[in-house]
Amino acid sequence: METTGVHVFDYLKYVSEATDQKAILRNLMEAYGNDVWNYAFSICRNMDLADDITQDAFLKVYKNLTTFRGESSVKTWLLTITRNTTYDYLRKAFWKKVTLVGFIGSTGTCPSAENEAMEKLYASDIWKKVISLPAKYREILILHAHYQLSTKEMAAVLRISEGTVKSRLHHARLKVLQLKEREALESI
């Protein structure tokens, strides 16, 4: 579905003027649902909260379909909404209280799609190291490596300058290398 910004903008403009905006939302959820959930989880590190954030982010997308201006790709637009929604959740006083109490493990007996997705993400040793990084480094590596956003797109999502993106990306890579070196030394 992802094409140049102009084609996507024209598509969204055409479709948002149509009467079936629910079909648009369904298409966006099918195309980007996993990306939105994974990005929310990578920031909040809580599966249940990532579920809520994903639902809320797509609700915001539905309400704001007509405001998409095509200045970025649809993926960048969705990830920006997801990031903002996630940080809104994390700022809420309720979440801060829940965090102090601690997380409760999953009680379901069947693995959910989210659990399976996270198992694949954790399957790679490097992703385990990335997830352990501080948020600003973790987020920049995930946007770069997993979502393959350009420096300009990352700057737009994170609302920072392109120079800051490059600096954070450099420091994040160094931190991953340091974790790998530390692990190698510990295994000796």
Image (tube, rainbow, N blue to C red):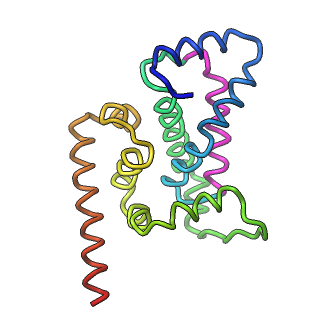
Answer left or right for 51 relative to 152: right
Figure check: 121 above or below 17: below
Residue 111 drawn at (x, y percent):
72, 65
**Which contiguous range is marked in magenta?**
48-67
Examine the structure image and report whether residue 20 is included in the region drawn in magenta: no
Given residues 10 and 40, the one toward you in this image is: 10
* Predominant SS along the magenta part: helix
Figure check: 148 above or below 16: below
Residue 76 drawn at (x, y percent):
46, 32
* Residue at image location 21% in from the left, 46% down from the top: 167
Given residues 93 and 10, the one toward you in this image is: 10
* Residue at image location 36% in from the left, 34% down from the top: 159
Q: Quadrant of residue 63?
A: top right
Quadrant housing the C terminus:
bottom left
* Residue at image location 54% in from the left, 45% down from the top: 86
Q: Quadrant of residue 120?
A: bottom right
Answer left or right for 63 relative to 166: right
Given residues 110 and 46, the one toward you in this image is: 110
Quadrant housing the N terminus:
top right
Examine the structure image and report whether residue 62 is included in the region drawn in magenta: yes
Task: State how many labels appear.
Answer: 0
Residue 92 drawn at (x, y percent):
56, 48
Q: Quadrant of residue 150?
A: top left
Answer left or right for 188 relative to 45: left
Residue 66 drawn at (x, y percent):
60, 15
Figure check: 164 above or below 128: above
* Residue at image location 25% in from the left, 84% down from the top: 185
Q: Residue furthest bottom?
A: 188
Given residues 39 and 99, the one toward you in this image is: 39
